[in-house]
Image (spheres, rainbow, N blue to C red):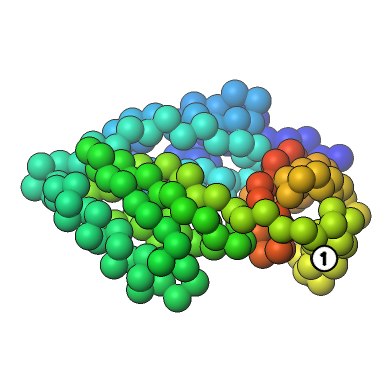
């Protein structure tokens, strides 16, 4: 196995990636690294920038996990009222073809959006959050959307997930173990990168009967 990158090398890589990403201002974000775990700090003007900083850090080789402690402070000049944000949230949910908007309710308090309701797929729950998190004025999102229980047997859920992962040429399904209990899927094993990990999580979210995913995957680029 090749040696992993040092924390100092990872920190420099994250700083360079933040500078490269046009969606963020690297001067607003602090970066520290301990044993491959990156902690981001600082204050940004919107929730989208906070997420962009997190995504940038995950793209850097050697990063295992990211603790996103960036604070969001919406400046007064771009600070819509909660009513305006709620109206924008409703429009975003209605305009997204993948979101069952009629089954989702939202509450906005001081720019923080809480989503509630019931959907059939974990993917729909994630799509709803994705549809609103880049809206102006949003400081954060709490996703309380409930996944409707199904009567699909755990072994059948596991089988369709395994088949989906095996179809993906960018990874080897044999490196991942899948546990299923009461609609909760636990993933353990190794992946080569954050992109591969995200692809695996995305594939699982499409499986009917999955209500929650416990991510215990370890990123190891040298496997």
State the image quarter where residue 108 is shown: top left
Instruction: Please name the residue shown 61% across and 61% down the image.
Output: 121
State the image quarter where residue 65 is shown: top right
Q: Is residue 86 visible?
A: yes
Q: Is residue 19 visible?
A: no
Residue 111, horizontal then vertical, whole percent: 25, 43
- The answer to whether 52 is drawn above or below residue 39 in the figure is below
In the picture, measured across the screen, residue 216 lies left or right of residue 59, that is right
Residue 208, horizontal then vertical, whole percent: 71, 63
User: Local crowd at mark 1 within 10 Å, few (<14), some, or many (≥20)?
Assistant: some
Residue 106, horizontal then vertical, whole percent: 34, 51
- Closest to the observer: 62 or 142? 142
Can you name the residue that lies furthest to the top here?
34
Instruction: Please name the residue shown 76% across and 65% down the image.
Output: 170
- Closest to the observer: 151 or 15? 151
Residue 196, horizontal then vertical, whole percent: 69, 56
Label 1's element? helix
- Say which residue label 1 marks: 160
In the picture, measured across the screen, residue 162 lies left or right of residue 132, that is right
Q: How many marks?
A: 1
- The answer to whether 214 is drawn above or below residue 211 in the figure is above
State the image quarter where residue 74 is shown: top left
- Closest to the observer: 213 or 144? 144
In the picture, measured across the screen, residue 219 lies left or right of residue 69, that is right
- Closest to the observer: 127 or 171? 127
Instruction: Please name the residue shown 35% across and 73% down the image.
Output: 95
Instruction: Please name the residue shown 67% across and 64% down the image.
Output: 206
Can you name the residue that lies furthest to the left here?
77
Q: Considering the image in quadrants, where does the N terminus appear?
A: top right
């Amino acid at each position: 196995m090749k040696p992993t990158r040092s924390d100092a090398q990872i920190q420099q890589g994250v700083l360079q990636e933040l500078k490269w990403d046009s969606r963020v201002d690297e001067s607003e974000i602090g970066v520290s690294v301990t044993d491959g775990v990156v902690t981001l700090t600082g204050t940004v003007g919107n929730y989208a920038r906070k997420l962009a900083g997190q995504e940038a850090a995950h793209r850097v080789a050697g990063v295992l996990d990211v603790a996103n402690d960036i604070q969001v402070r919406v400046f007064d000049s771009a600070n819509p009222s909660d009513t305006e944000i709620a109206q924008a949230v409703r429009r975003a949910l209605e305009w997204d073809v993948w979101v069952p908007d009629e089954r989702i309710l939202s509450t906005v308090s001081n720019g923080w959006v809480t989503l509630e309701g019931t959907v059939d797929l974990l993917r729909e729950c994630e799509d709803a959050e994705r549809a609103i998190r880049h809206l102006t004025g949003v400081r954060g999102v709490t996703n309380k959307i409930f996944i409707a229980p199904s009567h699909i047997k755990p072994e059948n859920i596991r089988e369709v997930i395994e088949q989906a992962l095996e179809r993906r040429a960018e990874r080897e399904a044999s490196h991942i173990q899948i546990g299923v209990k009461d609609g909760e899927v636990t993933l353990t094993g190794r992946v080569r990168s954050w992109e591969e990990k995200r692809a695996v999580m995305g594939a699982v979210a499409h499986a009917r009967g999955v209500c929650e995913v416990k991510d215990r995957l370890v990123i190891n680029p040298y496997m």
